[in-house]
């Protein structure tokens, strides 16, 4: 009789522990799902177009000469070209790719989109000189436009515009870092655990 009572108590105790374990497991799974959803929502909030704008101006002189009769005759055309350009450097974070490892509580940023540089020049011509034998044509305007954009690209590289755009990008990505740190998760990018904005900066500005 005593043996049956002990067996009954053991069975009841086992069932109780099983329910407690299942309940604990359920709560743990719910916490992981909640944290994962919270992180995904933060990434969606960060996933936007980060745009930095700049303005550049330059003045160039365009010249072209046509020669005839063994270079005895020449006809020159030239113009003063004034350029005002609006430039944008953008990162479309909707295109950012990432992976969530729920088991190891790790977010891995797989790829960050490359910056998109858009140059919108306003070109004005002054002091235009040409002749009927050497007039301005569409080919001249194409050459001028190509030269203008090439010169502007060099100015952009030497300016702080791209650096400012990268700083804004890092600031947006750091919002994910703050959340993961708060929740006890890890954030990785290019094989390195990201622990600060400085870590992001070293990777992005390589």
Image: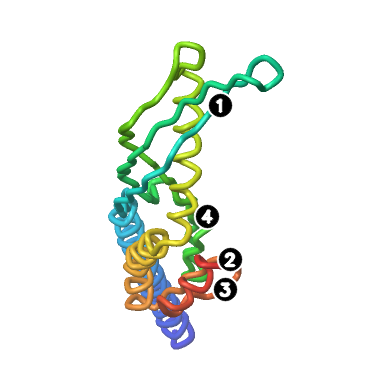
**10 Å neighbourhood of mark 4: few (<14), some, or many (≥20)?**
some
Q: Nearer the viewer, mark 4 or mark 1?
A: 1
Above/below status of 163 relative to 98: below
Mark closest to the chain's N terminus, 4 or 1:
1
Q: Earlier in the sequence, mark 4 or mark 2?
A: 4
Q: Are marks 2 and 3 in contact (CB under 8 Å)?
A: yes
Q: Measure how far apart labels 2 and 3 are at the Cα level.
A: 6 Å
Mark found first going from the N terminus, 4 or 3: 4
Q: Nearer the viewer, residue 38 or 204?
A: 204
Callout 2 crowding tier (Cα within 10 Å): few <14, some 14–19, many ≥20: few
Residue at numbered disc 1: 65
Position in image of residue 55 (x %, y %): 29, 51
Q: Which residue is mark 2?
A: 190
- The residue depicted at 30 percent of the width and 44 percent of the height is 86
Q: Measure the C-alpha gap from mark 1 to mark 2.
A: 54 Å
Query: Mark 3 highlights which residue?
Result: 192
Vertical arrangement, residue 132 with respect to residue 4, above or below: above
Q: Read off the residue under disc 4.
A: 111
**Mark 2 or mark 1, which is nearer the start of the sequence?**
1
């Amino acid at each position: 009789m005593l043996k049956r009572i002990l067996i009954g108590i053991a069975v009841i105790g086992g069932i109780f522990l099983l329910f407690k374990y299942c309940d604990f497991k359920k709560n743990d799974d719910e916490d992981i799902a909640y944290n994962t959803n919270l992180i995904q929502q933060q990434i969606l909030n960060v996933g936007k177009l980060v745009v930095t704008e700049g303005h550049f101006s330059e003045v160039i002189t365009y010249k072209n000469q046509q020669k005839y009769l063994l270079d005895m005759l020449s006809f020159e055309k030239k113009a003063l070209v004034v350029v005002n350009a609006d430039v944008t450097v953008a990162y479309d974070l909707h295109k950012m790719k990432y992976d969530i490892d729920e088991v190891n509580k790790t977010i891995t940023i797989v790829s960050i989109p490359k910056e998109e540089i858009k140059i919108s020049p306003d070109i004005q011509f002054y002091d235009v000189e040409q002749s009927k034998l050497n007039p301005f044509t569409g080919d001249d305007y194409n050459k001028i436009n190509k030269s203008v954009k090439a010169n502007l690209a060099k100015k952009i590289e030497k300016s702080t515009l791209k650096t400012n755009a990268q700083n804004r990008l890092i600031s947006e990505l750091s919002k994910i870092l703050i959340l993961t740190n708060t929740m006890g998760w890890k954030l990785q990018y290019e094989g390195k655990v990201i622990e600060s904005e400085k870590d992001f900066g070293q990777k992005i500005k390589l």
